[in-house]
Image: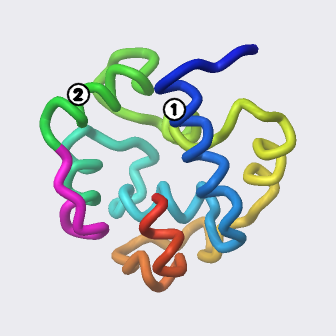
Amino acid sequence: MQLVGQERHIEQSKIRLIEHTDFNIFDAFKMFDQMGKGSLTISEIHSGLVNTLGLIPTNQEMDLFFTRYDKDRDGRLRFAEFCQAFVPIDRGYSQLLNNRQGSRRPDSYGYSRPDEMFMPVTIMDL
């Protein structure tokens, strides 16, 4: 599959994030899913970006993200949909990420600062 323009940039960003050995998809999801519901609303992702990562996305950026990854259009990102935002197309990188375990127990939820889970450079790429 030939990737062009924005698709190539997104794929390269995913690969750069995965190259950080401390990054795993489980902890990234839990960082936004503070209540452990198993899905995320657009406002929960926005709040996580602002309050946890210090990023201020525009409404247009949030709408584009949800339009791209909320496949069933129910207004919630389930874990599988969230994974599509971070798992590369490349099978080798995809396997590498999917084989990483979260640093927290599966039943442990609650607030965790990103710097307790990820190195600063990983947070920047996230």
The residue that appears at 14% across and 41% down in the rendered structure is 58
Q: Amino acid at mark 2?
A: Asp
CA gap, disc 2 to disc 1? Answer: 15 Å
- Element under disc 2: helix
Tell me the residue that label 1 is attached to.
81
Which of label 2 and label 1 is nearer to you?
2
Task: Examine the rendered structure and indicate whether residue 107 appears above or below residue 90.
Answer: below
State the image coordinates of residue 82 (x, y, percent, origin top left). 49, 39
First in residue order: circle 2 vs circle 1 = 2
State the image coordinates of residue 71 (x, y, percent, origin top left). 45, 18
- Element under disc 1: helix
**Numbered range of the magenta stretch:** 50-57
Q: Amino acid at mark 1?
A: Glu
Q: Is residue 76 or residue 125 the one in the foreground?
A: 125
Task: Examine the rendered structure and indicate whether residue 17 appears above or below residue 82.
Answer: below
Q: Is residue 96 or residue 43 the one in the foreground?
A: 96
Q: Is residue 116 or residue 80 the one in the foreground?
A: 116
